[in-house]
Amino acid sequence: MPTRQDVINFAAGPAGMATDVVEEYAKDFVNFQNLGMGVGEISHRSKEGTGIVNRTEQSLRRMYGLPDNFHILFMQGGGTEQFAAVLYNVYAHHALYNPNAKELVANYIVTGSWSKKALNEAQRLGFPCHVAADTKELTGKYGCLPKDSDLNYTRAGETSLVYWCDNETIHGVEYNEPPANIPKGAVRVCDASSNFISRRIDFTKHDILFAGAQKNAGPAGITMVFVRDSILERALVPDLHKMGIPVSTTMADYKLMADSNSLYNTLPIPTLHAINLGLQYMEGKGGLPFLEEASYKKSEMVYQVLDKYPIYENFVDTCARSRMNVTFRVISQDLENKLLVGAEKLHMMQLKGHRSIGGVRVSLYNAITVEETEQLVKYLESFGAEHSK
């Protein structure tokens, strides 16, 4: 049986974690801070529990140089819960200033499965929606980003929010910059779940940014929500009822979460502690500058070998290629299966593409080192050379 040291885990999420972090967490799960209790057994409202919440927030603020006019919320329900939460909170915010807030339109830029799911949730809940661009409708595939000229927003004063997914894990598409020409007054909402903590972020270009932990930050169970303070200003619930605007569920209410320091109910403190251990580990490696440089280096190595051999087919436009999720096909299903089986024999695990599109997916999250990526590239090089003759 392979050991942890033998395996390279290229999973798309939940992703691998650094062994040093896992070992430290394992100790704390048995006995945290010499309390004789594990971190999963302490109260979320205890000194130790609130300390974990506060330290994790401080770590994130320090890493990103986060402006003081942003709150960080630790929420549950994954990124999928945020599809609805952003709508409830944004419309409640607009309702404070705009008596016609109910008529405002949520704009979605659809570049893959996850932004499409967010749009579907908005439609399911009955919010006014508009597709500012859908790259599959524009080009016949999800493998590119819309040009600035493709973005057809509703007008300023009529737009509640503009929503995009920064990195589409299934199709391997990533933004380099936020979308252009967003209408004035629209709340800018970014799903950064799969490229979070992989590069620096200009928060002057965002109003709400959320990220599930299970790609780059730690185990599943916590979603980190960065929200501009002004968005927390909102109409009261009775006024929302009168205006016919849907009211957020309690656990999706950003203002309630901010006022309670994310501790309105029992927050999964063990998960948050694992995240903070990971943040400390990554800071020790050099923080976001180090992680950003490593992410470009790793992905470029893989793309270079894919471009070198004709048996590999990458359908993503060069300018939209993801640093986090490299997706490709092999020219025949038999060869693709052979590639995956051979990789597993070398203990390179979870390379199979998403069930909805198949193929191969190499996920290069923070826990994957440059050296481990080099091992994969060596295998792809050998396989490509052998089968391109």
Image: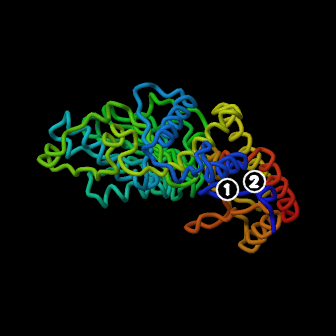
Label 1, residues with CA under 10 Å away: few <14, some 14-19, many ≥20:
many
Quadrant containing the N terminus in the rendered view: bottom right
Q: Nearer the viewer, residue 18 or 64?
A: 18
In the image, which disc is placed on residue 314?
A: 1
Locate residue 236: give its quadrant.
top left
Residue type (three-letter) at the residue carrying disc 1: Asn
Q: Which mark is residue 338?
A: none
Task: State yes or no: discs 2 and 1 in contact (Cβ < 8 Å).
Answer: yes
Label 2: few (<14), some (14–19) or many (≥20) C-alpha neighbours in 10 Å? many
In the rendered view, would you say 85 is above or below 125?
Answer: above
Residue type at tag 2: Leu
Can residue 174 be seen here? The reply is yes
Q: Earlier in the sequence, mark 2 or mark 1?
A: 2
Q: Of helix, strand and loop, which one carries label 2?
A: helix
Q: Residue at x 59, y 64 (%)?
A: 354
Circle 2 sits on which residue? 306
Q: Position of residue 258 (x, y in %)?
A: 36, 38
